[in-house]
Image: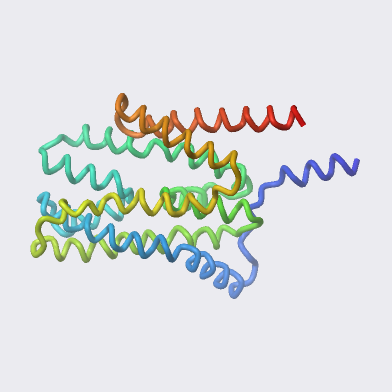
Amino acid sequence: MSGQGSQANQMEPVISPALGRSTGKTADFFRGVLVSTPVVVGYLAISVAYGILARQAGLGLVESVLMSVLVYAGSAQFIGVGMLAAGAGGAAIIATTFLVNIRHLLYSASLAPYLQRVGMGRLAALGFGLTDEAFSLDIVELSRGSRSTVFLAGIHLMPYLAWISGSVIGGLLGGLVSGIGQLGLDFALPAMFIALLVPQVKDRLLAATAVVSGFVSLILSHFMQGSWNIILATLIAASLGMGWEKWRRRCG
């Protein structure tokens, strides 16, 4: 019986309900805000570049900011602005945005075991704020132990507000600054994601999985559009890593 109880405890999701007292909720929220600080700083810089590019692509200030409010997807917004500037139709932009962000299905699947006791309303709110960088912070924090939904809300909300704020600043500057696209600032998003990923690679298995995933994704990117190369590379590398781990345990 004790063995079964121990196994059951291991299967419990590590997400905890929000703290009961308002003071506890506030403290938990601001702990999440503090954790999100590196992402907030990065999002401010990149969203300013987005706002400038959006204005130069012909969008008005309100339209540029509304895209950040409603879409909130850095890479998809940069691509969408470029397609608008090239005269692409709405259906093509929507389809491309879907393909670019389809990797979020994997993010959601990874977080699902931790969020089994969370209601649909909170799941929807947290899901809207799920970006590459927010996912990295979420999975690290949840793997360390129990975290409340208020804590996760702090991680998700502040980067969202930072992205909107930077979009407003960039939109206002859009008519004054030129040549921003030549600076390559859109690369800062994947660079920041890599910086968040590296501390999670704590052993040879994780390092090998990350290297294989990146290598396979790079090869597949020459044959696939959107985010399919990322998804397939992740599945291939994760499967190989899981097989390697099982083989290593079986061999003692």
Looking at this rendering, what residue extends furthest in the top direction?
Answer: 223
Q: Is residue 87 left or right of residue 19?
A: left
Residue 104 picture location, percent across and down: 43, 40
Q: What residue is drawn where x is 50% and y is 41%? A: 108
Looking at this rendering, what residue extends furthest in the right direction?
Answer: 1
Q: What residue is drawn where x is 49% and y is 68%? A: 34
Q: What residue is drawn where x is 42% and y is 30%? A: 216
**Front-most of 206 and 1?**
206
Q: How many marks?
A: 0
Q: Is residue 22 left or right of residue 103?
A: right
**Front-most of 150 and 195?**
195
Q: Is residue 81 left or right of residue 240?
A: left
Q: Is residue 29 above or below residue 240?
A: below
Check the image and tell me how it is coloured: rainbow
Q: Is residue 105 above or below residue 54?
A: above
Q: Quadrant of the C terminus?
A: top right
Q: Quadrant of the N terminus?
A: top right
Residue 196 picture location, percent across and down: 46, 54
Q: Is residue 237 above or below residue 200?
A: above
Residue 92 picture location, percent across and down: 21, 32
Q: What residue is drawn where x is 9% and y is 65%? A: 176
Looking at this rendering, what residue extends furthest in the bottom direction?
Answer: 23
Give residue 149's quadrant in the image. Answer: bottom right
Residue 96 picture location, percent across and down: 27, 34
